[in-house]
Amino acid sequence: MNSNSKLTVGLLLLLVLILLVGRKSFMRQKVLRKDHRARKAARVVFNFYEAVTKAKDPSKVASLFSRDATLVGTVSQQIRSGPQIKEYFEYFAKLPGLNAVPSRTDQTMQRISRNVYLYSNFVAWTWNNPEDGSPVKVIARMTFLIRGNKIVQLHSSSMPERPMGLSSNTKGIY
């Protein structure tokens, strides 16, 4: 084999290696989408939004949390656990017209271990002000730590104003 043939074979092998590495990364993303545990974790988040906004049932919301769960709520000044989680959602059950619209573009799901997932997204929460009926809208960041089919931790906070000079990575959905 002459040196030109060796170079050609070497370049082809390098190209195949580059394609395989890129494909492996792509495949990892596809595997997460096909992972039945990831789908279960996403279902927990969907059930959370349904229980808060449609059912308006604080007991149903609380049942989505594990016994050792913690909640760092947007309007709470304490870290909540146990029965305090249900108490927190009793407030939201009373808000007229409560609705949640999760962003379809600003969301991530990461597998932490075999059955533990971290799911983060932005959500537009809307409701009618109980005092005068005027519409209220809050954009929140929501991060769920899910183990099996239970929420282990939920952290939510309202979206801060972007300081001038800092570029935005969001798609501007809201």
Image (tube, rainbow, N blue to C red):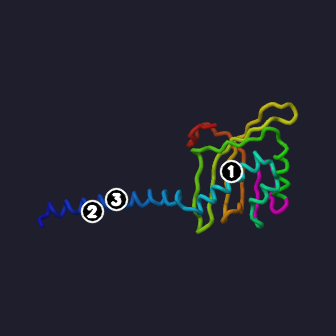
- The residue that appears at 45% across and 59% down in the rendered structure is 27
**Residue 96: horizontal and vertical position, in percent?**
82, 39
The tag earlier along the polypeptide, 3 or 1, is 3
- Most extreme residue toward the front is 55
**Is label 3 in a helix, a strand or a loop?**
helix
Cα separation between marks 2 and 1: 44 Å
Quadrant of residue 97 in the image?
Answer: top right
- Most extreme residue toward the bottom is 114
Mark 3: which amino acid? Ile
Foreground residue among 162 and 124 = 124
Q: Which residues are magenta?
A: 69-83
Neighbour tally class for label 1: few under 14, some 14-19, many 20 plus, Cα within 10 Å: many
**Residue 18: horizontal and vertical position, in percent?**
34, 59
Residue 55 shows which numbered tag?
none
**Left or right: 117, with 10 as reference point:** right
The tag earlier along the polypeptide, 2 or 1, is 2
Residue 142 shows which numbered tag?
1
**Is label 2 in a helix, a strand or a loop?**
helix
Residue 18 shows which numbered tag?
3
Quadrant of residue 53 in the image?
Answer: top right
Neighbour tally class for label 2: few under 14, some 14-19, many 20 plus, Cα within 10 Å: few
**Left or right: 46, with 169 as reference point:** right
Cα separation between marks 3 and 1: 36 Å
Q: Is residue 73 magenta?
A: yes
Q: Is residue 103 magenta?
A: no
The residue identified by callout 2 is 13
- The residue that appears at 67% across and 51% down in the rendered structure is 46
Mark 1: which amino acid? Met
